[in-house]
Image (cartoon, helix red, strand yellow):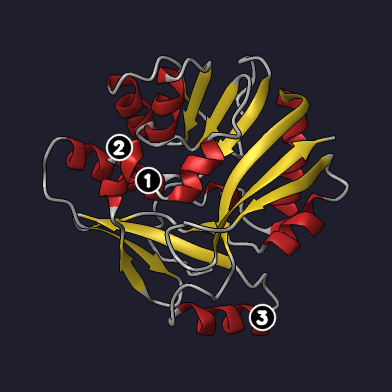
Amino acid sequence: MPTSSQKPPPGSSFELYARAMLDHWLGKKVLVEFERDDGYRSASKIEGSFAPSSRWPRMEREALRLVRGRVLDLGCGPGRHALFLQKKGFDVVGVDASPTQVALARIRGLAQVYEASVRRLPRGLGTFDTVLMLGNNLGLPGDLPRTRRFLRELREITRTRARIIGNSRIPGTWSDDHLPYVKRNLRRKRPAGLLILRVRYRGKVGDWFELLLISPEELARLAEGTGWELVRVIWEGGYVPGDYVGVLERR
């Protein structure tokens, strides 16, 4: 992973992204970029995080119909999905690694929202029937061993027959620039869909973090032995080709 003489603090990329979200919500013009460790940059269209449900991809709307019971929205951001479910009468708890995101979600009306992350799963909030991880959040734990450990740890805060509803993408399928990166990963004996990213916003650069993109077949294999099973895949109506929502159930 690239290093620098002045290493940004852990979590700074998530905080920069949150500040861009806040600026957008305040009506400011925002240009925020994700930089990959091979130098490729892409602008993030954060306005989608504030879009009404009528403008969400069909895949997301269908996924939310599968929510049941008490809900934990991991990486809730400004609360788009959590607020939707709260209005539907669900008992929803949102968590996010960025204190700015937590504050923004609270200002926007989310009743229960706390600072936590997939690497610091919240304790003391009770147990849940659904864990929501849309917006590619299924890949937030990072590499394969950490994702496997994360799935095992989720059993400690979920109930029997609980569901994980998470979004990911098949590596190398949605843009021409990503397939060479997949091949580069394989040459380096890294998982094909492991992205190393950082956020750039208003002249500031955040820390590097990992995001794992994984195919449904790999997700099913990864879940074996963790107490979870992939029971459904929603394919159609995503953001880009290769997008899908996986539904895992606790065994």
Please state which amino acid type lies under the numbered disc 1. Trp
- Check the picture and name the quadrant holding the N terminus: bottom right
Q: Amino acid at mark 2?
A: Pro
- Specify whether 95 is left or right of 77: right
Residue type at mark 3 is Leu
Q: Residues within 10 Å of mark 2 (few under 14, many from 20)?
A: few
Residue depicted at x 76% and y 46%: 231
Q: Which one is earlier in the sequence, the residue at label 3 or at label 2?
A: 2
Q: Can you identify the residue that label 2 sits on?
A: 52
- In the rendered structure, the answer to whether residue 160 lies left or right of residue 186 reads right
Image coordinates for residue 112, horizontal then vertical, percent: 45, 16
Residue 186: assigned label? 3
Disc 3 element: helix
Q: Is residue 92 above or below residue 238?
A: above
Residue 175 sits in quarter: bottom left
Q: Which residue is mark 1?
A: 56
